[in-house]
Amino acid sequence: MIEKTVAELSAALAAGDISSVELTQTYLNRIGQLNSELNAFITVCEDSAMQQANAADTARAGGDSGALLGIPIAHKDIFCTEGVLTTCGSRMLHNFVSPYNATVVERLNSAGVVTLGKTNMDEFAMGSSNETSFFGDVRNPWDTKRVPGGSSGGSAAAVAADLCAMATGTDTGGSIRQPAAFCGITGFKPSYGRVSRWGMVAFASSLDQAGPLTKSAEDAALMLNAIAGLDEKDSTSIDTPTDDYTAGLNNSLEGLKIGIPRQHFAEGLNSEVEQSIRDALKEYEKLGATIKEIDLPNNHLSVSAYYVVAPAEASANLSRFDGVRYGYRCEDPVDLEDMYKRSRSEGFGDEVKRRILVGTYALSAGFYDAYYRKAQKIRRLIKNDFDEAFKEVDVIIGPTSPHTAFELGSKSDPVAMYLEDIYTIAVNLAGLPGISVPAGLVDGLPIGMHMVTNDFEESKLLNIAHKFQQSTDWHTRKPAIKTEEA
Ligand code: GLN
């Protein structure tokens, strides 16, 4: 049962084949068996999960029937959860119990989900491998010597290993899509503004966006139905109508125009990954799509622009962590300045400090024009590239990552790590929706196919992803984790 999709579990709950209490207990057992190996969860909420499961079963017996009622979920530990530890993967927040729920959490709670716990992540969502977490590395269920990707690596590993039915993540430069690719699941980043950022610990506010990590595009649609839409608490959430994201999943793809960016099939792409994506594209041709090459001429500037904009915003956002109000405070400070300095020196890890330094530098008088303003101009050029492309095609498809999951500890150079997001980062700079779906296996490891549509075309993107999953079975492949069946 635990390997099933949310849509399947929802049907089983509705039919009375299983109760939420039974389902929740089964996931908790599996977390108990596998979490010491995978380190996907920082916090497991056994008691409250069982209470919520009970409440869901009672509500169902009383006639409630929401699609997510009684479905067990895990939240990336970047989302504030009332009364539950919310660490953001950092020593700085290692003891922070949030007094309120993020809007995403609140909306999912209203839909009746069961929260199993909080998942591990790169510290403050900075990273592509989950190795920057204060709570230790997450391991990829397909091969525990390898990374799960990051920064939503705990959520991706948890979904892939069937430790939960679905999970939340956040994506600033690729942090939902790249770990989804490495773990063989579906990861969906909605358009900027589609989902509220309120109560999500801020990294780079103009790029951050919450989204689902799931076992199928259909499940991503079910989750998006619950979380999308205007939130008055987030002034950047958009006041445009949301869809029923499941309604158009089965629309025909006859006549769909697919664009293949030349720049994504160039040097640096593993040839077997490329072959898998090209094979996947043939499926789309069978479904009636046509394929043409397109150009995203400024794509090569995206990582550089991102690593000015994101650290600049991070340096401002992270100034709130000062040891005064909440979070980590150093021992025995001699005065206020000593407290600020040591709390921040001891509370933040190396990657976070590197970003704060870079960001502060880029924003400082004298350098602002040279770095920050220039990066913003490049951002506009990148958006223009997409605008041009979408005049000709409906969707842009390529690989999510140039390769499969790499070994833990194998990338010590920060810049090599930054290049991990070479295919995903431009999408955040442009604010567009993007999805990664499983599209093959190379040497027994999953690879992800990355698809992007124009602003607020979430329904179209989910339709395109769902149709692929209807005609292939890559998304149903499972890692062979050695354990007795829970
Ligand atoms: N890997 C990128 C970074 O380290 C993106 C992270 C993210 O999307 N949160 O900043």
Image (cartoon, grey):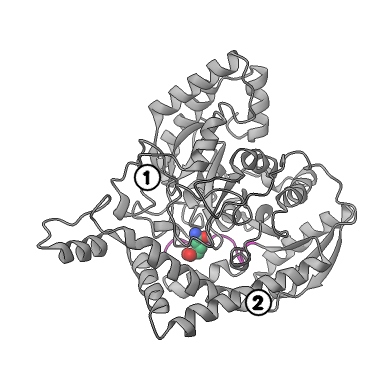
Q: Which mark is residue 381?
A: 2
Amino acid type of the residue that numbered disc 2 sits on in the rendered structure: Leu
Amino acid type of the residue that numbered disc 1 sits on in the rendered structure: Thr
User: Which quadrant would residue 473 be assigned to in this image?
Assistant: top right
Can the viewer see residue 195?
A: yes
x and y percentages locating residue 82 in the rendered image: 39, 37
Q: Is residue 159 left or right of residue 343?
A: right
User: Which quadrant would residue 349 be assigned to in this image?
Assistant: bottom left
- Residue at 42% over, 78% down: 362
**Dot 2: element:** helix
| Magenta segment main secondary structure | loop
Q: CA distance from mark 2 to mark 1?
A: 37 Å
**Dot 1: element:** loop
Residue 178 vs 99, above or below: the answer is below
- In front of the other: 204 or 396: 204
- Residue at 61% over, 52% down: 238
Say which quadrant the N terminus sits in: top right
Q: Which mark is residue 35?
A: none
Q: Magenta residues, as a range?
A: 400-411
x and y percentages locating residue 94 in the rendered image: 30, 49
- In front of the other: 62 or 400: 62
Q: Verify whether residue 405 appears in magenta.
A: yes
Specify whether tag 1 is near ligand 1 (CB below 8 Å): no
Can the viewer see residue 481?
A: no
Q: Sequence-wise, which precedes: disc 2 or disc 1?
A: 1
Q: Verify whether residue 190 appears in magenta.
A: no
